[in-house]
Image: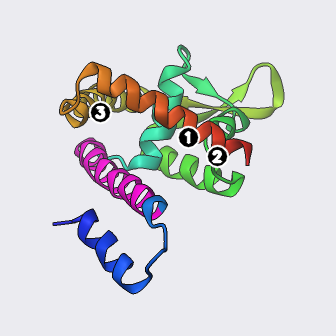
Amino acid sequence: MYDMNKIKAQWAAQKPGLDTEPMALIGQIIRLSAQLTKEMNKTFARHGLNGASFDMLATLLRSGPPHALSPNQLLETMMITSGTMTNRIDQLEKDKLVVRIKNSNDKRSVLVQLTAKGYEIIDAAVTDHVENQKRLVEGMSEAERTTLNELLQTYLAALDHE
């Protein structure tokens, strides 16, 4: 079992006067992120997906009919390189979850569109994902979730300004 107080005491014994409070806070956030990722990946795997494929398919689904975006539009919503994007599209196309279609607004470009199979899979996966996320936060009250969300938004905004 992970005992932050024990870890802080060990640091205090080895490095008296060292303020380890930031280390403790960031350590907790990293542990939380790892646990949440592990639990969410289980849901994605039940649908034959991973986090990356879920993200791309969910982005197409939430874009609304015809569930098609250009690779550049997809890149705007994801923090990946264009090469990584191409590889993801290629894999999803190989799995018959997306197709590349001609962009009627720009004959030189293509759109990435969900196939019927892709739509069916991501529609079910999103539903399961939301239910899983509800389960993952049910240990906190609504007020606690709101407060934590506000604190994290403040923290992320401060980091974004650096």
Q: Quadrant of residue 31?
A: bottom left
Q: Would residue 140 be found to the left or right of residue 112 on screen?
A: left
Amino acid tagged 1? Tyr
| 3 or 1: mark nearer the eye | 1
**Secondary structure found at label 1:** helix
Main secondary structure type of the part rendered in magenta: helix
Q: Quadrant of residue 121?
A: top left
Q: Which residue is mark 1?
A: 155
Residue 114 in sight here: no
Other-residue count near label 1 (Cα within 10 Å), few / some / many at <14 / 14–19 / ≥20: few
Q: Would residue 52 be found to the left or right of residue 69 on screen?
A: left
Q: Nearer the viewer, residue 69 or 151?
A: 151
**Image coords of residue 153 (percent x, y):** 53, 32
**Image coords of residue 27 (percent x, y):** 39, 61
Question: In the orientation shown, which residue stands out farthest toward the top?
Answer: 65
**Secondary structure found at label 3:** helix
Q: Residue at x 23, y 30 (%)?
A: 140
Q: Which residue is mark 2?
A: 159
**Image coords of residue 8 (percent x, y):** 33, 70
> Residue 54 — which label?
none
Q: Is residue 28 magenta?
A: yes
Q: Which residue is mark 3?
A: 129
Q: Nearer the viewer, residue 47 or 117?
A: 47
Question: In the orientation shown, which residue stands out farthest toward the bottom?
Answer: 14
**Secondary structure found at label 2:** helix
Q: Would residue 38 be found to the left or right of residue 93 on screen?
A: left
Amino acid tagged 3? His
Q: Nearer the viewer, residue 118 or 3?
A: 3
